[in-house]
Image (cartoon, grey):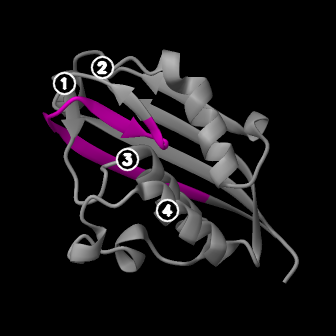
Amino acid sequence: MTRVGLGYDSHRFKEGDGVVLGGVFIPFHRALDGHSDADAVIHALIDALLGAAGKGDIGEHFPDTQASYQGFDSTTLLERVMEMIAPSWAVENIDLVILAEEPKIAPYKARIRERIAALCRMNPSAVSVKGKTNEGMGFIGRGEGIAVLASVLITRGDT
């Protein structure tokens, strides 16, 4: 059995000295605002994985109303999701689109791909990371924040 999942996340900018995307710190003159570390890549990926596996969404498992997740490292959340789905599902492919006017994503794509592959227990060649601008349109185009789309393909593993 094969399933596809789609995830989305966005975070606005705040004052700071860098963003975390896909578990990789990117130096920047601002940070992303969120309850955890605001890693929009991991949050979108978690929603895609949970959706594909029929396990709900990120808010059901890691609610932003829970104080224990304040400032939390999202890679730990992804590791927990992988533990949740790994007995039944294998991640075959991940496709990520990071929508941001800045910071530029291209210099960090390989590191993000490697980090995501390691966290999802897969070959980096099965992870795609793309950076796109919004051509000056909307909240992304105005430089107010970042959005991420994630799609995954999972197959039934041994149970």
Vertical arrangement, residue 3 with respect to residue 159, above or below: above
Q: Are marks 2 and 1 in contact (CB under 8 Å)?
A: yes
Q: Along the polypeptide, which appears first: circle 1 or circle 3?
A: 3
Q: As drawn, which residue projects farthest toward the right?
A: 158
Residue 76, numbered circle: 4
Which residue is under mark 1? 143
Q: Position of residue 115 (x, y in %)?
A: 60, 41
Q: Position of residue 101 (x, y in %)?
A: 29, 20
Q: Is residue 98 left or right of residue 30?
A: right
Q: Nearer the viewer, residue 156 or 70?
A: 70
- Distance from label 1 to label 3 (Cα)? 17 Å
Q: Helix, strand, or loop for circle 4?
A: helix
Q: Position of residue 76 (x, y in %)?
A: 49, 62
Identify the residue at horizontal 76%, vertical 78% (top origin): 87
What's the magenta bit mostly, secondary-structure-wise? Answer: strand
- Distance from label 2 to label 1 (Cα)? 7 Å
Q: Position of residue 120 (x, y in %)?
A: 67, 55
Q: Amino acid at mark 2?
A: Glu
Q: Amino acid at mark 4?
A: Thr
Classed neighbour count for the residue bearing mark 2: other residues with Cα under 10 Å, few (<14), some (14–19), many (≥20): some
Classed neighbour count for the residue bearing mark 4: other residues with Cα under 10 Å, few (<14), some (14–19), many (≥20): few
Q: Along the polypeptide, which appears first: circle 3 or circle 4?
A: 3
- Distance from label 3 to label 2 (Cα)? 15 Å
Q: Nearer the viewer, residue 78 or 56?
A: 78
Image quadrant in which the N terminus is located: bottom right
Which residue is under mark 3? 39
